[in-house]
Image (cartoon, rainbow, N blue to C red):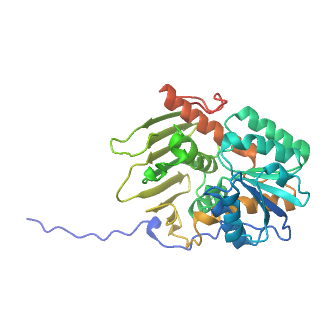
Amino acid sequence: MAKKLSVRRKPPAAEARFRAPRLPYRPRDPKRYRPAIGLVACGGIARHHLAAYRAAGYRVVALCDAVLSRARRLKRDFFPEAKVYGDYRDLLARDDVEVVDLAAHPKTREKMIEASLAAGKHVLSQKPFVLDLAFGRRMVALADTQGVKLAVNQNGRWAPHFSYLRHAVRSGLIGDVAAAHMVVHWDHNIVRGTEFENIKHLILYDFAIHWFDMVRCLVDRPPKRVHASIARSSTQEVRPALLGQVAIEYDGAQATLVFDGDTRFAPLDHTYVTGSRGTLTSSGPDLKRQKVTVVTAAGRASPRLTGRWFDDGFHGTMGELLTSIEEDREPSNSARDNLESLALCFAAVASAERHKPVVPGTVRKMPA
């Protein structure tokens, strides 16, 4: 028998190591602008807002909640000098408050957005921004008329791994994007017993709005159609369906989102973005611990990222709003821009309801 020859193959260029590009993925702060900020609605997420603002050196002077004890607790824990209100209109009456953070739920928040803009305040709205695209457009127009900024708290954009990915795509590092695939395997039964359990489309609406928004950042072209479905896991413990999947069609590109919200073991969050010049991946056991990898003709690299989604995401959204005010420009997380993310989300929810593909932009209101 002939002896088998051993051939040593030269490793491909993509296996070589190179230094990952330095990109401005960290939250930005205004150079000098430090306005008085008022926060309305002191529920569970507000704690993360305030922790981020305190760490950034922002000035929160007013806290408001219909349940005064919740506002007083946050005042004690984060901004002891802040004044507490039970009615948001009293907070808006303060001339010194220039920026309002509205952390209420969407339906309750509608009247707050309109009143805040009418009072001449810059607004950071919690996500999802609105339930009706027409109302959202009216609020964008009102902000323009009043000469103020209206931004949305799409804090996932400033999660370190997502922020690096979107800056890498924007810089042209991987060329023209052909595909983006994002999967989230985790346990979302944690909402059991909370008001979130009453949201039918908890996965595709309240949770996945971050991923619809990120897909828009990664695949910068108009989506043609979206096909989505949801299902209940046989072992889940909450009412809303915890399984969801979405396929998005573009001219010359595609994207998929998969959510397994009843994963009890080995959770994994993974993102894969490929383009004409390279590929980006981000993977880890959860949304706080992620390793980003860049692969191009120059080789393979993994940047050392600092920070975490909570609370850098909240620092990033408010920092972008304040910086845009200082620089007199549209914030990158503007409500005008976010309406495109909502149009994609609404179409996906409608597709899951109708069991057929839907064209983004044709669904004006949040279904169901």
Q: Which residue is drawn at 54% across and 40% down?
A: 199
Examine the rendered structure and indicate whether residue 312 appears above or below residue 243.
below
Q: Which residue is drawn at 56% across and 48% down?
A: 211
Question: Residue 118 is drawn in which quadrant?
Answer: top right
In-image side of 190 versus 171 (left or right): left
In-image side of 67 versus 274 (left or right): right
Q: Where is residue 105 in the image (x, y as percent from the top left)?
A: 65, 45
Residue extending farthest left: 1
- Asked if residue 162 can be seen in this view, the reply is yes
Total count of labels: 0
Examine the rendered structure and indicate whether residue 189 appears above or below residue 27.
above
Q: Quadrant of the N terminus?
A: bottom left
**359, 83: nearer the viewer:** 83
In-image side of 123 versus 94 (left or right): left
**54, 222: nearer the viewer:** 54
**145, 100: nearer the viewer:** 100
Q: Position of residue 207 (x, y in %)?
A: 55, 47
Q: Position of residue 113 (x, y in %)?
A: 78, 45
Q: In which quarter of the image is the C terminus?
A: top right
Q: Position of residue 334 (x, y in %)?
A: 75, 49
Q: Which residue is drawn at 68% across and 39% down?
A: 107
Q: Which residue is drawn at 69% across and 70% down?
A: 76
- Asked if residue 255 can be seen in this view, the reply is no
